[in-house]
Structures are given as C-alpha cells and as structure tokens.
Image: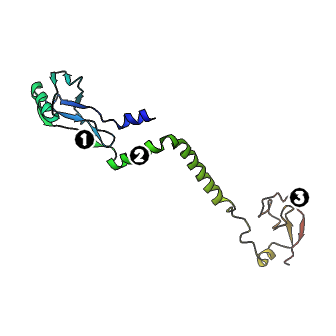
C-alpha cells in the first residue's frame, strides 16, 4: 500500500514536447500528486534516457537548467521554442488532491472497515427511522357516525377484533382474511 502511495505521489518526469505540424517545441511536465498537466492535442512528448532525447527529427542532450536546456534542444531540432511547460492543468484543485492523499495515506489500511461500518450505520439509521412508522389503516379510525353508515351488520376481525364493513375481504387494520369472520350486529346502531 505504501509503495502504491509512493508511486502516486512521485512527480512525473520532464519531457521535450514537439508539434510536428507547426514545428513548435517546448518542455512538458505531467505533474505530481498536487497537480496534473495534459499534453495539448497535436503534441508528442519525448522522455529523456539519461538526459538524451531521441525524436523522429533528431536527437539532443538535456543538461543543466531546464528552460535553457529545452530552448537549446528545440533550436538543434530546427523547431521554435514556445514554453518551458506547454501542458494544460487539469484534474482536481491542489487542495482536493492534498486531502485525498492525506485520507489515503492515513486511513488507507482502514478504508474497507470504514466502508463496511458506514454502510451498516446507514442501514441501521434507515431501519430505526422506519421502525413503527408503517401507517396503520386505523390511524384515523372511523367514528361512530361513519360506522353507522356501514349497515345493520358488520364483520369482526378474528385476529384483531376490528369492526369492518361486510363488503371488505380483508381487515382494514391488520389485513387478515375476513372470509370466515363472523358477522355481528353493528354496535353503533
């Protein structure tokens, strides 16, 4: 894990970049753990092998300070120098990369455990918040005036003793089957 983190944090090597269509040349650096630079379209990067760069149009030696060395290589290859880094910055802002790096470095070994605990916490919160919140059909039970309109006889649920209209096939409170439920005189008439 630490080795992988080391690879992610290592700066990318510098390169010489050429645009063969426009005959332009410049330095290119891909970035490091804090920033990332993309090579513009039409450009090709050539990475040195022990300060020696081989391209399709020739070779040159990079030595000493970066900018003068790149300018010298561009001139030797017959291309015009445009910049010491032609890369366009992309990706996340540096502070976000820094936070991600810190989290990965310090919490990396514990991330699977933290992920499982987080999922369990969400499931527990959802379970507790939904427990007992199932709306009952009798949260607003019918009053005596409404039950009177059900007729002379009603069905009494054998499971919960709730009074139901005779036209219902299941209890309005507990959903029990009312097909064998006894009919009783409506007590509100």
Q: State which tag comes first along the sequence, 3 or 1.
A: 1
Looking at the image, residue 136 lies above or below residue 46: below
Instruction: Pinpoint residue 180: horizontal percent, then vertical percent.
Output: 88, 58
Mark closer to the observer (2, 1): 2
Q: State which tag comes first along the sequence, 2 or 1.
A: 1
Residue drawn where x is 79% and y is 62% of the image: 171
Label 1 sits on a secondary structure element that is strand
Instruction: Pinpoint residue 44: horizontal percent, then vertical percent.
Output: 23, 29
- Image disc number at residue 180: 3
Label 3 sits on a secondary structure element that is loop
State the separation of the CA atoms marked 2 and 3.
68 Å
Pick whichever, 134 or 54, lies toward us: 54
Quarter-of-image position of residue 189: bottom right
Mark closer to the observer (2, 3): 2
Instruction: Pinpoint residue 39: horizontal percent, then vertical percent.
Output: 25, 35
Looking at the image, residue 50 lies above or below residue 34: above
Looking at the image, residue 162 lies above or below residue 74: below
Residue identified by numbered label 2: 102
Quick check: 1 left or right of 50?
Answer: right
């Amino acid at each position: 894990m630490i080795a992988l983190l080391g690879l992610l944090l290592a700066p990318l090597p510098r390169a010489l970049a050429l645009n063969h269509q426009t005959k332009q040349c410049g330095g290119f650096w891909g970035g490091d753990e804090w920033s990332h630079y993309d090579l513009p379209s039409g450009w090709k990067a050539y990475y040195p092998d022990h300060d020696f760069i081989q391209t399709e149009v020739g070779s040159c030696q990079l030595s000493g300070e970066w900018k003068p060395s790149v300018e010298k290589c561009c001139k030797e290859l017959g291309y015009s120098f445009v910049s010491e880094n032609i890369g366009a910055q992309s990706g996340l802002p540096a502070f976000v990369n820094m936070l991600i790096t810190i989290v990965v470095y310090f919490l990396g070994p514990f991330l699977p455990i933290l992920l499982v605990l987080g999922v369990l916490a969400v499931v527990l919160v959802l379970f507790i918040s939904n427990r007992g919140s199932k709306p009952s059909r009798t949260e607003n039970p019918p009053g005596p005036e409404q039950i009177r309109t059900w007729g002379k006889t009603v069905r009494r649920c054998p499971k919960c003793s709730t009074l139901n209209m005779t036209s219902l096939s299941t209890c309005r409170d507990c959903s029990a089957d009312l097909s064998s439920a006894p009919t009783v005189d409506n007590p509100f008439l």
